[in-house]
Image (cartoon, rainbow, N blue to C red):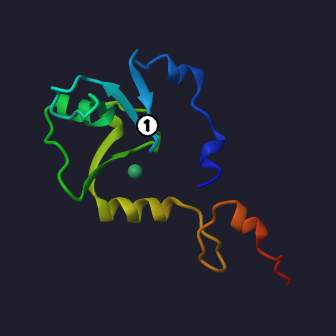
């Protein structure tokens, strides 16, 4: 998953961030909602995309369902950027979007591909 980390969130994106939000280890934004919130973890934080989704009156994603970020920016939690899909659909989508070596079909994650020996014609 190299390369993805290469582009940083632009300053214009940052200003949308509410105070009391942070980016979790998965790259998703978490917001402080208090422990009594139905979406909160034991520490009183909840994933912003879930909060936004549920606030829009949509049912909370069930087991085996995920909210996909249409522009692949996990910090962009506008409702129009969120799309409910099953985990298997989601995995397939991300595998498809990841560049593959046209010859070997291997997923390219930068390092590995560059380490491949040069192909002679
Ligand atoms: Zn996704």
Instruction: Say which of 31 and 107 sits in front.
Output: 31
Q: Measured along the vertical axis of the image, is residue 73 above or below residue 16?
A: below
Q: Measured along the vertical axis of the image, is residue 18 above or below residue 105?
A: above
Place residue 47 in its image quadrant. Answer: top left
Q: Measured along the vertical axis of the image, is residue 100 above or below residue 69?
A: below
Q: Is residue 87 left or right of residue 74?
A: left
Q: Residue furthest right?
A: 120
Place residue 8 in its image quadrant. Answer: top right
Q: Is residue 116 left or right of residue 48?
A: right
Name the element at disc 1: loop
Q: Measured along the vertical axis of the image, is residue 91 above or below residue 15?
A: below
Residue 91 is situated, as x and y percent measured from the top left of the image, at 39, 62
- What residue is drawn where x is 63% and y is 65%? 108
Q: Residue under circle 1?
A: 24
Question: Quadrant location of the C terminus?
Answer: bottom right
Instruction: Say which of 51 and 10 sits in front.
Output: 51
Instruction: Say which of 93 and 29 sits in front.
Output: 29
Q: Is residue 71 left or right of residue 79?
A: right
Residue 71 is situated, as x and y percent measured from the top left of the image, at 45, 42
- What residue is drawn where x is 51% and y is 24%? 13
- What residue is drawn where x is 41% and y is 38%? 28
Q: Residue furthest bottom?
A: 121
């Amino acid at each position: 998953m190299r390369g993805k980390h290469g582009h940083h969130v632009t300053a214009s994106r940052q200003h949308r961030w509410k105070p009391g939000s942070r980016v979790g280890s998965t790259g998703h934004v978490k917001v402080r909602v208090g422990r009594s919130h139905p979406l909160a973890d034991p520490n009183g934080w909840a994933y912003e995309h879930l909060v936004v989704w549920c606030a829009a009156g949509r049912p909370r994603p069930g087991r085996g369902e995920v909210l996909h970020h249409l522009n692949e920016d996990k910090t962009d939690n506008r409702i129009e950027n969120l799309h409910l899909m099953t985990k298997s659909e989601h995995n397939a989508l991300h595998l498809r979007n990841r560049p593959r070596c046209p010859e070997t079909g291997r997923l390219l994650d930068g390092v590995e591909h560059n380490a491949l020996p040069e192909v002679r014609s």
